[in-house]
Amino acid sequence: MTTDWQNAITMRSMVLRTLLPAFFVVCLTVHAYSEASYRMMTGLRAGAFYPVGVALQTLLELKQSGEDDILLDVLPSTGARNNIESLLSGKADIVFADAGTIADALMQRGPFKDLQGGKRLRVLMPLWPDVGHFVIRSRDMATSTMSDFRELFGATVSLGAHSAGSYRAAAETFIRNGIYYDRLFNVPDLDDAQTVSAFLADRVNAFVMFRNEGNLPVELALKHPSIQAQLVSISDVQLEKMLTQELPVWQRHVIDAETYLNQPNRIETVSQMNYLVVRDDFDVLDAFKIARMFFENISFLEALHPSVRKIEPARFRETVIFPMHPGSERYFVETRQCSLPFCLFN
């Protein structure tokens, strides 16, 4: 049952190993000119953050001109919580994080209640939305909404790796709707690959995964007719309960019908944005250069990971709900003066 998942992960790793070294060979001769090097913490290697981080690292190396160059040292991590803690403790310079985790750090709540320095967080750039995928077997469905999870008392339900932003998002979604997951379910500490493998082997009864729309783990879970897994929706009433908070972390998101195999109906769920985050003392000019390089070469990044295709450069500023770094703000100010639809890429 796990063959498809393992083959898919192996194939993606092979593609990255094949493409990226070719780019790095071109870059080897220019490393000596670099003036700035930053540590970027991403996430688990099997997730979306790590390959996008490697793609950005590659892009910056390819675009070196010999003056004022920027290098990234891309490091895997256990998730968004680990990233924010490392950023504020000085162990990282740039990190990936979801909106909910950033909000917790800014307000010193949840796992960050004793963490100092959360007010220093600044957005380097908005990325793509993480979409809530609530997957349950057909035999356990009654309302086709998140409420069906209430009936899984004593079952094993995976919310993802416990240090990941996806876990925090799933947990908050449940708690705000009176579904006390930690009392109702057995909640294992499994990453995405382990979750899907366990689900297909019937060791996990249901799972929640906040990832990009059309992601491979959910696709593999839904495509097996014998498993008969389905996505359930979040109702308007359930969404309303999630919006009673200080920052607008959550948005309505619709997964169109046929986005996944065996998904005949559209699914109304929720999403939250991901961001690249730095501290307030990050170099202003380097922040500007990284934002400009990212958005002006977005097609290159899209070719290396599908998550990037959901980034909307034209909505660059309006998707940011947190304090923005002055370097990124400068990029926004300079590009918004252009009136043509694709002026960001000129």
Image: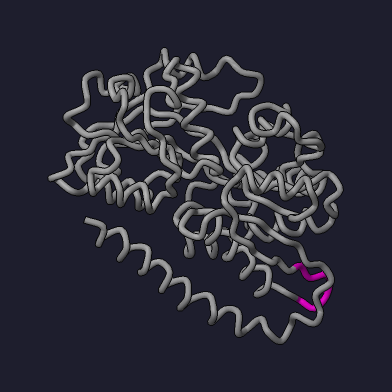
Q: Residue at x 76, y 67 (%)?
A: 70
Residue 81 in the figure: left or right of residue 250 = right
Number of marks in the image?
0
Q: Residue at x 51, y 41 (%)?
A: 162
> In the displayed structure, would residue 33 be above or below residue 203?
below
Q: Who is closer to the viewer here, 346 or 217?
A: 217
Q: Who is closer to the viewer here, 92 or 64?
A: 92
Kindly tell me whether residue 334 is visible in this rendering: no
Residue extending farthest to the left is 226
Residue 315 in the figure: left or right of residue 308 = right
Residue 143 in the figure: left or right of residue 128 = left
Magenta residues, as a range?
Answer: 65-70
Kindly tell me whether residue 267 is visible in this rendering: yes
Q: Residue at x 32, y 48 (%)?
A: 196
Overall secondary structure of the magenta section? loop
Q: Is residue 69 magenta?
A: yes
